[in-house]
Amino acid sequence: MRQLNSSYLCLIAMGFGLGGCASGPTIYTNQNPTVDFTNFRTYGYVEQMGTDVLGGPASLLTQFMQAAVDREMAGRGYELSSGETDLQINFYVETQEKIQSRQVPSGPTYGGGYYGYRGGYYGTWGGYSQTTEITQYTEGTVSIDVIDNVRDELVWEGVVVGRIRESTMANLEERVNEVIPEIMADYPYRVPPPPAE
């Protein structure tokens, strides 16, 4: 596994800055259909978070994510515990360099460049002059894993995938606070309140 450093974590956190993307982030959630979520009441975090350097302190990204997840879990009636818990939560981040290419006409030019009235609605005939535009960008993936602590088995995951933007880092905590509720919106269960005495 790639060792994480603070600048790497900052870039990855952009998986949260997806609010700055034109099309926004893509969010996926999955759950184990055989699991009865009514059995879970308490949660904690794995000892070595996937968002931290091995053996190092909790990164700011981890701290921001834990605070946001704590709010979401408390709102669903779960109790955070430092002892034995029903659930354990882990985070993971990854980046990949991506290259995107597209063909654009490089035909007749007038004034400042090609008159683009075709606007992508239709193409030209073979042999027409084309230019290839290549764009390189970084794609970030951020995952939240919820694990059955007794069975040591993943029971739910939320994943957000999006293009990393530098502007995210200016407001990392704010971006984390925006996207965690979106990821957790499909979490399948709320712990009922205790019966009134």
Image (cartoon, rainbow, N blue to C red):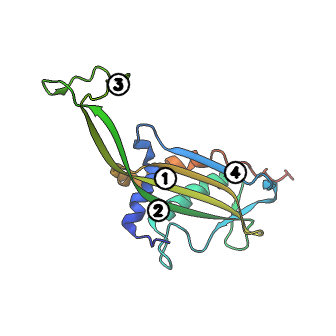
Cα–Cα gap, marks 4 and 2: 23 Å
Q: Residue at x 14, y 27 (%)?
A: 112
Q: Earlier in the sequence, mark 1 or mark 3?
A: 3
Amino acid type at circle 1 is Val
Name the mark on residue 123: 3
Residue 127: x percent and y percent? 27, 29
Name the mark on residue 76: 4
Label pair 2/1, CB-CB below 8 angstroms: yes
Label 1: which residue?
176
Q: Earlier in the sequence, mark 4 or mark 3?
A: 4
Q: Residue at x 66, y 60 (%)?
A: 146
Q: Nearer the viewer, mark 4 or mark 3?
A: 3
Report crowding for label 3: few under 14, some 14 to 19, many 20 or more residues within 10 A (C-alpha).
few
Residue 131: x percent and y percent? 25, 37
In front: 75, or 144? 144
Cα–Cα gap, marks 3 and 2: 45 Å
Q: Residue at x 42, y 63 (%)?
A: 9
Cα–Cα gap, marks 4 and 3: 52 Å
Measured along the vertical axis of the image, is residue 193 above or below residue 111?
A: below
Q: Earlier in the sequence, mark 2 or mark 1?
A: 2
Label 2: which residue?
61
Q: Earlier in the sequence, mark 1 or mark 4?
A: 4
Amino acid type at circle 2 is Leu
Tag 3's secondary structure?
loop
